[in-house]
Image (cartoon, rainbow, N blue to C red):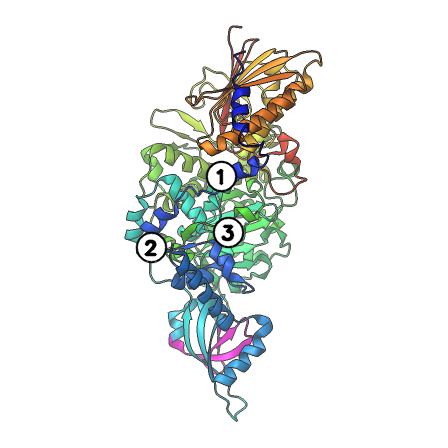
Amino acid sequence: MPPNHFESEVESFLEGSHGDRTHNKQQADHHTVTPLCGTLLINEHFPGRVVRKDLVKAVRGNAVVPSYVLEYLLAQYAASDDEATILSGIDTVRKILATHYVNRNEAELVKSEIRRKGRHRIIDKVSVILNEKNDVHEASFENLQLKGVIIDDGTVKRNPKLLVGGVWCICDIDYFHSDDAKVVPWILSSLKPIQVAAADLEDYLETRQAFTTGEWIDLLIQSIGLNPEQFTDRGKLIALTRLIPFVERNYNLVELGPKGTGKSHTFSEFSPNGILVSGGEVTVAKLFVNNANGRIGLVGYWDCIAFDEFAANKRTDQNLVNVMKNYLANKSFSRGTSIYGAEASMAFIGNTTHTVPYMLKNSDLFDELPNAYRDPAWLDRIHHYIPGWEVAPIRSEMFSNGYGFIVDYLAEILRSMRSTDFSDKYSEFFTLDSSLSTRDQDGIRKTFSGLMKLIHPSGRACENEVRVLLEYAIEGRKRVKDSILRIDATMRDTPVHFRYMDRQGSWHEVISLEERQYPHLYRRSWSLLGEESVENTAMPGSFSALSGGAGDQAQTPQMELRIADDEEPKEGHRDFAAGQKGVSYRKLLLPYLTGVTRIRITDPYIRLPHQGRNLADLLSLIASVKDDADEIEVLLVTSRDIKEEFQKHQLLMLRDIKVASEAEGIYFNVKFDDSIHDRRIETDHGWRIDLGKGLDIWQKPGDNPFDFGRNHQEFRLVRSDFSVHYMKISE
């Protein structure tokens, strides 16, 4: 072991620090407060079109209104990076809400105010019906609880969404009493829907080029009110997938997952061009066409219709299922001899009551849906399945405090791009397997097109960026198809390969996370891809030959993820995916560390408290399996924190790990090398383990102090894709 210079470094820092024990929180805060996408960059390129997202919470108060309503007001009065202007704007918006927003429990007070003043401006949700008896349009105010207010036909014609679902508006209401009891005293003198003016798409596309792909993704995440620092790359991609129905025509999306993961948030708060309805409230007349009067339903007026609590709706109308089935496939529906077309996308969201392995063992991933919707023909119309179980429950720190687009502005941009088609942009680099059905390919292409429009709106992206989006799109459609094959045995006869070929002619198989994590359950009774493909597919979490190349040519699984602690270690590599569970140091490393006397760990990022915790967990694992009389030397080669003021905290943390280790016969030392990049573990009995992401491989645990993942690594979610290579070297 090298000379112990680590002790002297610690002591020199301690001389002036008095053993500061608050370093962990300070250091953690230091590394999380700076957003990836800077405030100056956003405000410089999109002046007047961005707003600080935490201001929405500051002004909301008791106003039960969508975020886009509040951001509309903030954009008028607080669209600035000057703190004084922001504070003044917040105060103005609060006064507007206090004066004009109608709280339902204060409706009578507001009515009295209108009567007293003769005219009063309000903010409320307005819906309109046609009174056929009197041949007039009548407005209803949701919170003010007024009905039968006459509204002129011109206003209705300019704002047709008033007829279907209602629109948040700023209205001037007059009061004029008449002795005629039949005359409604309330008069709607003016109505202005809350929405921004038409957005400049060309300017948007040009300005996008000032941002890197990472910065742009973070800007979009902040725009929907989320903090990008709290999400992995895959988590961000899932969040953006919820926006595809707003930018892609006739896109059909399903998301099922645990409660509290924000499934309905995007659809209820993001856009005035979408509507969130309860699954139980939907009828053929409301959704498509009313046979009694020929009036077109929701699909004729909204860009996106999201069905909330869809899985909980056990009362289904078979006629609705049949009409919806035709619409999802053909973008049309019929009434008698008339056929109508529409462009509304549909999102079906609901909660799951069972774990993924339970569903795989006993049913399929659509297990929670009402039986009428588990029809293979209906499911085959779904383009993408979002795995809601990969999404962490929403916590307070997951909401954004940074700048993002005014959601109404972004909504208009996305709406203007619905006519753009990027579905074939991948073909420059990749080719889909010909075994994929037309609907499989349609689902993949529409998801890919939507993500391209969101992330690369100019249609230009490099090969690797295209690959990431294409694989994700394939995975989402594969999740749908695999469940259909479980339900309908007749469709299993024709093998289907969810793979693509690159320009070099190599095939790349795409495997979903649940297939990687639970292979023994995923294919418990039949082979989805055919025997040959199963044999040639390397499951992440399994060993593959080190000499194997890309594609399906040389990859042969040797063992499953779950290996015994005492299993004989083997050369090879193992791949893991973001969001995966069941990964631990015990399974990943322990078989290769048993019987060692010296270990060298190289990892440049042992700086933050959770990284130190990971290292301590590994050392405690080694201590727990060694003979009590044995002593083991461990050398950590790492880099100093880039901030000098936090180097002290790093040293204090490592000193504490050293003290705890030595008490259990683990003699721990540290060598600093700021030039290292690779992560690896080397042992004195001849093993080298290359760690793609080092020891820091899991997502941050939630706030729940009883979260199982706090004490057991197997219950944690993998932070991002990584690989581990095992090589036998000379001792």
Nearer the observer, 518 or 43: 43
What residue sits right under mark 2 in the picture?
47
Q: Is residue 706 above or below residue 601?
A: below
Q: Residues within 10 Å of mark 1 (few under 14, many from 20)?
A: few
In this rendering, would 632 be left or right of 645?
Answer: right
Can residue 719 be seen here? The reply is yes
Residue displayed at 51% across by 74% down: 140
SS for dot 3: strand
Look at label 2 and name its amino acid: Pro
What residue sits right under mark 3 in the picture?
347
What residue sits right under mark 1 in the picture?
30
Between disc 2 and disc 3, the foreground one is 2
Look at label 1 and name its amino acid: His
Range shown magenta? 125-154
Residue 473 percent coordinates (x, y): 45, 39
**Which callout, 2 or 3, points at the residue further toward the start of the chain?**
2
Q: Which mark is residue 258?
A: none
Give yes or no for contact between labels 2 and 1 (Cβ–Cβ under 8 Å): no
